[in-house]
Image: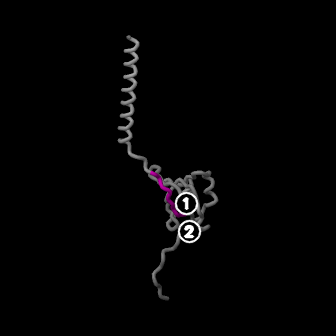
Amino acid sequence: MQRMVLGLFTALAVCVSVTVTSAQTKDQSKKQPAKQEQKTVSMTGCVDEQEGHYVLVDDRSLTRIADLEADGFPNEGFAKHMGHKVTVRGMSTTNGARSLFKVRTVETISETCAPQAAPRGNQKF
């Protein structure tokens, strides 16, 4: 008889434990924000190397737009695009104060990249 009562209490304790754990899991999932889906985006600029890292710079001002990190190929793959105007596609995140762009693909727009002069107004000679 004692074994039967002990077995019944053990089974009841397991059921209560499973129910409490299940309820806690549901409550925690409600409190945690859903992960945002990262969308593939694109950026256009010039590939440069600064401070030992490949970066994308604005083709007019040559200011840094984002640090580049290869995703699916070695970082050395950026070397063949140095000085070229490109469009990179991938995921953009922040890395401290700087923007980090995880690059999936690189498309060359132009094999040169230089600051362009500001357009001049009508000049009379």
Placement of 4 over or under 72, stated as above or below: above
Q: Three-letter amino acid code at disc 2?
A: Ala
Q: How many marks?
A: 2
Residue 53 appears at what percent x and percent y?
56, 53
Of helix, strand and loop, which mostly describes the magenta segment? strand
Residue 90 appears at what percent x and percent y?
53, 56
Q: Which residues are magenta?
A: 37-46
Q: Is residue 112 left or right of residue 17?
A: right
Q: Is residue 52 visible?
A: no
Residue bearing mark 1 = 88
The circle on residue 38 is none
**Residue under the image location 44 percent in, 52 percent down:** 97
The residue at the far bottom in this view is 125
Judging depth in this view, the residue of 49 and 56 nearest the camera is: 56
- Quarter of the image for residue 105 reads bottom right
Helix, strand or loop under label 2: loop
Judging depth in this view, the residue of 120 and 41 nearest the camera is: 41
Q: Three-letter amino acid code at disc 1?
A: Val
CA separation in Å, label 2 and label 1: 18 Å
Q: Is residue 87 visible?
A: yes
Helix, strand or loop under label 1: strand
- Quarter of the image for residue 111 reads bottom right
Residue 65: say if magenta: no
- Label 2: how many Cα within 10 Å (few below 14, some 14–19, many 20+): some
Residue 47 appears at what percent x and percent y?
57, 60
Depth-wise, is mark 2 or mark 1 nearer the camera?
1
Residue bearing mark 2 = 114
Work out whether mark 2 precedes mark 1 in sequence or the reverse, and give the earlier one: 1
**Residue under the image location 38 percent in, 45 percent down:** 33
**Residue under the image location 61 percent in, 52 percent down:** 73
- Colour mapping: one colour
**Contact? badges 2 and 1 (CB < 8 Å):** no
